[in-house]
Amino acid sequence: MNDFKTDILSLEFDELESEILKLGEAKFRAAQIFSWLHEKRVKSFDEMTNLSNALRQKLKDRFFINHLTVSRRLSSSKDSTVKYLYELSDGNHIETVLMEYEHGTSLCISTQVGCKMGCRFCASTIAGFKRNLEPSEMLLQIYETERLEGKKVQSLVLMGIGEPLDNFENTIHFLRLLSDKRGKNLSLRHVSVSTCGIVPRIKELAKMGLGITLSVSLHAANDKTRSQIMPINDKYGVDELIATCKEYFSKTGRRISFEYSVIDGVNDRRENAVELNKLLGGFNCHINIIPVNKIKERSFSSSRKSANTFKKYLENLGMNATVRRTLGSDIDAACGQLRREYEI
Ligand code: SAH
């Protein structure tokens, strides 16, 4: 039904303005409509009460307001983590996770339905790739969760289902909408974009200087191990990736965060820490160690103990690292695990 209509929630302010002009309407209408969509967050054109009925009808003919519906809400009994399984307007499902940290409320959003990257330890990839998310669908994960939970999201991580840099254009549109002063107005300093390492896109991001934090899922410091667990490494190997990360840091001045999921028997030994030190020692970056989450289709495992042991190896080599707190472990808060149950 919506095939021929434009997704109005995905339009940046300037784009909306030119659409409104095309309809023969005054420019200031764009500001009113943008405010209804992104500040008051109405779900229908009829709620835009400062517009005439005629204009509301024009908008209905030309646009649609995208929406998400809740398929499931899981809340942790161990901490205040809440996970939503949202249904998109075409019936696909994505996951969004709300977490409370000492520094505030953080939301982890999905950027694609499924994922093409094929990382062996990741649940998001198992049900396959369906499609990219629209900017509106990324925004709505914030808007809906804020509304339903009565909370304000203070920081955001693009670490849910999907590879944000494989949906580059929509992700950039989304980031611009997110930081628009007339909308959610979230500073991109509070946004982390996580990537498995798509080198040309990291270079593009470096040129844009958006102020985001880049998280790079490294998980191994040599090509042999990394290629075993992350197929993207066959395309962009470790040396090329790290050289690009160094370029990113020197261009943007933003410290990169490297994610290292410890997997028993794969990347957890002292010699792996030595390799990581060779690769990143002296580079001003952050290393975030994560105990790999068990997913039922895969046999990988590790524990908080292995993660802490790996941290000690790094510290003995003079490197700083943190072990990520595991939140919502009883509700499988890690991405992809819930959607998996809904896709056959
Ligand atoms: N595609 C992006 C973002 C989504 S994955 C990326 O690759 O970075 C978010 C993070 O969770 C990545 O660091 C990913 O490697 C990690 N991850 C995925 N499955 C995991 C699991 N089972 N255990 C621990 N970390 C996992």
Image: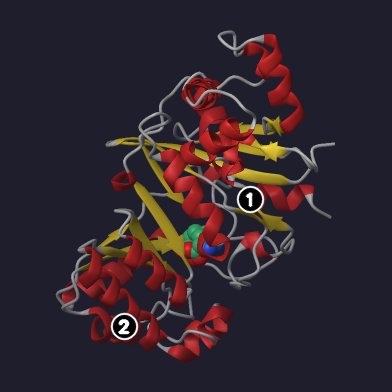
Q: Amino acid at mark 1?
A: Leu
- Residue 260 appearing in the image: no
Quadrant hosting residue 279: bottom left
Furthest-front residue in view?
24
Image location of residue 232, percent across then percent down: 55, 79
Q: Are marks 2 and 1 in contact (CB under 8 Å)?
A: no
Count of marks placed on residues: 2
Give SS at disc 1.
loop
Say which residue label 2 marks: 243
Camera-side residue: 153 or 266?
153
The answer to whether 4 appears left or right of 202 in the picture is right
Q: Quadrant of the C terminus?
A: bottom right
- Residue 214 appearing in the image: yes
Give SS at disc 2.
helix
Camera-side residue: 47 or 155?
47
Image location of residue 2, percent across then percent down: 79, 37
Q: Quadrant of the N terminus?
A: top right
From the viewer's perspective, is residue 237 above or below residue 62? below
Residue at 31 percent of width and 41 percent of height? 187
The answer to whether 144 appears left or right of 247 in the picture is right
Camera-side residue: 123 or 196?
196
Residue at 62 percent of width and 27 percent of height? 24
Mark 1 residue crowding within 10 angstroms, few (<14) / some (14–19) / many (20+): many
Q: CA distance from mark 2 to mark 1?
A: 30 Å
Mark 2 residue crowding within 10 angstroms, few (<14) / some (14–19) / many (20+): few
From the viewer's perspective, is residue 288 above or below residue 70? below
The answer to whether 318 appears left or right of 1 in the picture is left
Say which residue label 1 marks: 133
Image location of residue 209, percent across then percent down: 30, 59
Residue at 32 percent of width and 44 percent of height? 190
Q: Amino acid at mark 2?
A: Ala
